Amino acid sequence: MKALIFDVFGTLVDWRGSIALQAERDLSPLGLQTDWHAFADAWRNEYQPAMERVRSGQRAFCKLDVLHRDNLDTVLSRLGWTSVDEATRTKLTLAWHTLDAWPEVNHALTRLRKKFLLAPCSNGHIALMVNLARHNDWHWDAITGAEIARDYKPQAVVYQASAEALGCSWQETTMVAAHSSDLAAAKQSGLGTAFIGRPDEYGPGRGESKATTPVDFEAQDLNHLADLLEC
């Protein structure tokens, strides 16, 4: 194993808590009130259907900011909040660039980087990954994922192109994620796999605490993975 590539949304960052907080900050001054975590869930629920239109060829590849903005408009319209202005919509879309990391992530990445090449393998585009790294003080060796592959996970090309961009074979590269479906696709694409438990990703007890697909490593969190890999 030479490289670790990471899912980001949910595995490294608490997207749900971060989006709920920012949505409340941006929308409540407009006199709008709701369950903000439910708002974050509703926005996230549009994520896979939007990407599936790209994966299926119904829509040309575009950066995730475009899909996030379209999905935000859908959620606001569903709530009847059509009066939200353009500046607020743009600002809220960019909230995905400043999501906060889970508590142990920074220390664990520092440990892992001593032994392995590290890069995100996210459906987020390069600029989004750069901004998340700067926001959370991460040091990547490269940024890989959807934009270099011009497609979205779980298409095999996303995992394989990420490994190749690091100068590694698929077998030398391990995908790290908190989602069993992501890891199943990575394994089918020829990569190693490491599961990270995030039992509270979708709310208390609503995330995955154990892998539901065969994986090479299974860890309670990222520090535990560093222990398993002797970093």
Image (tube, grey):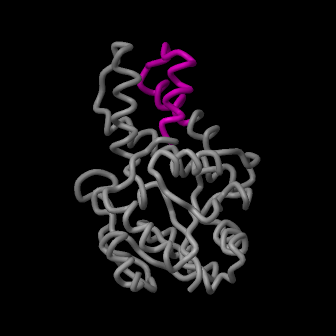
- Find residue 15 and report its horizontal and vertical position in percent: 41, 47
Along the horizontal axis of the image, is 56 left or right of 104? right
Q: Position of residue 45 (x, y in %)?
A: 46, 46
- In the image, the segment drawn in magenta is 71-96
Residue at 59%, 49% in the rendered image: 130
Q: Is residue 225 magenta?
A: no
- Image quadrant of residue 31? top left
**Residue located 64% across and 58% down the image:** 152
Q: Residue at x 51, y 68 (%)?
A: 182
Image coordinates of residue 221 in percent, x first then y, are 33, 69
Q: Nearer the viewer, residue 2 or 148?
A: 2
- For the C terminus, the quadrant is bottom left
* In this view, 89 is above or below 172: above
Q: Residue furthest left?
A: 204
Is residue 219 left or right of 71 when viewed as pictured?
Answer: left
Q: Residue furthest front?
A: 114
Q: Please, is residue 61 above or below residue 191 in the view?
A: above
Give above or below for 79 relative to 135.
Answer: above
How would you classify the magenta stretch by its main secondary structure? helix
How many numbered tags mark residues here? 0
In the foreground, 194 or 157: 194
Q: For the N terminus, give its image quadrant.
A: bottom right
Quadrant for residue 68, please give it. top right
